Image (cartoon, rainbow, N blue to C red):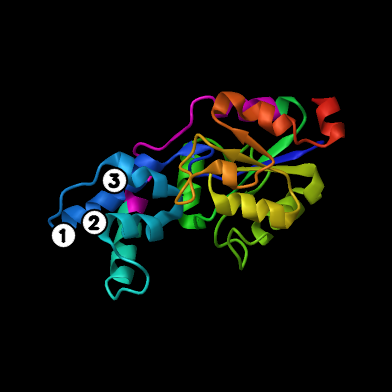
């Protein structure tokens, strides 16, 4: 195969925010607090427990109450992580098209394996994926380059044969450090640094519909010719 397209998971391939937000609001319910609006919590969904507990409860890892809250959040999330999570519309067709064009695709996420795998299996992504790298697969997490470099090695590609797609600044930083061209998925959660024009991504996709064009423009010449 001529190229490997690697994707972040939450906010890039899959819309997992509804279940993450539900788990965060459940922590508020446990404390007798009203739910926060979905729109307020969605932008930090890619940051997992750290971002969601900061927004929902005002807790940081320096707070004594943070670790018990984090463990309860993870337990609640694991129990309901496939209730509302779905692939973004159009992603399934995009992945099929990548394979049809003779290329491969994989996933590199900071979400740990025991939380990632049930959702990936639920969404039917296991069989066609060339590689799955989670937050605990290597000793480092994004924005360190090692998760992306490991994914490339595992799937049998050089970094310059890969393109990465992500919806958070750390995705762009990780790809640059790994020597991979990168697409900013501006339809995703975007996180605290939500202005994608400042991320220095090689290309930007404002929607799933424009994602392939953004990817294609960054492919090695051999892969573009084959596609």
Q: Residue at x 62, y 29 (%)?
A: 211
Position of residue 16 in the picture relative to residue 167 (left or right): left
- Magenta part of the chain: 77-98
Indicate whether 48 appears above or below 84.
below
Mark identifier at residue 22: 3
Q: Residue at x 39, y 57 (%)?
A: 51
Q: Residue furthest front?
A: 198
Residue 164 part of the magenta segment: no
**Quadrant of the image occupied by residue 182:** top right
Mark 1: which secondary structure?
loop
Indicate whether 71 appears above or below 83.
below
Mark 2: which secondary structure?
helix
Position of residue 48 in the picture relative to residue 129 (left or right): left
Mark 2 touches mark 1? (CB < 8 Å): yes
Q: Which residue is mark 2?
A: 27
Decide which of tag 1 and tag 3 comes sooner along the chain: 3
Q: Residue at x 23, y 46 (%)?
A: 36
Residue 124: x, y in percent? 53, 35
Q: Residue at x 81, y 50 (%)?
A: 158
Examine the rendering and report whether any part of residue 82 can be seen: no
Disc 2/disc 3 C-alpha distance (Å): 9 Å
Disc 2/disc 1 C-alpha distance (Å): 7 Å
Q: Residues within 10 Å of mark 1 (few under 14, many from 20)?
A: few
Q: Tell which of 222 and 154 is nearer to you.
A: 222
Q: Tell which of 18 and 47 is nearer to you.
A: 47
Mark identifier at residue 31: 1
Residue 189: x, y in percent? 45, 42
Examine the rendering and report whether any part of residue 108 can be seen: yes
Mark 3: which secondary structure?
helix
Decide which of tag 2 and tag 3 comes sooner along the chain: 3
């Amino acid at each position: 195969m001529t190229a490997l397209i690697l994707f972040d998971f939450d906010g890039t391939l899959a819309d997992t925010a509804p279940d993450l937000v539900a788990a965060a609001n459940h922590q508020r319910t446990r404390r007798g607090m009203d739910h926060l609006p979905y729109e307020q919590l969605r932008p930090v969904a890619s940051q997992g427990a750290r971002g969601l507990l900061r927004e929902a409860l005002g807790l940081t890892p320096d707070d004594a109450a943070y670790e018990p809250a984090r463990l309860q959040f993870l337990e609640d999330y694991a129990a309901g992580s496939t209730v509302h999570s779905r692939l973004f519309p159009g992603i399934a067709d995009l992945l099929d098209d990548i394979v049809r064009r003779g290329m491969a695709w994989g996933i590199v996420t900071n979400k740990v394996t025991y939380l990632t795998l049930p959702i990936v299996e639920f969404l039917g992504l296991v069989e066609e994926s060339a590689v799955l790298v989670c937050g605990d697969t290597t000793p480092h997490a994004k924005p360190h380059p090692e998760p992306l470099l490991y994914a490339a090695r595992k799937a049998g590609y050089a970094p310059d044969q890969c393109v990465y797609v992500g919806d958070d600044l750390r995705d762009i930083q990780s790809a640059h450090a790994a020597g991979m061209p990168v697409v900013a998925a501006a339809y995703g959660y975007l996180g605290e640094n939500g202005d994608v024009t400042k991320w220095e991504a090689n290309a930007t996709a404002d929607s799933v519909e424009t994602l392939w064009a953004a990817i294609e423009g960054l492919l090695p010449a051999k892969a573009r010719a084959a596609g």
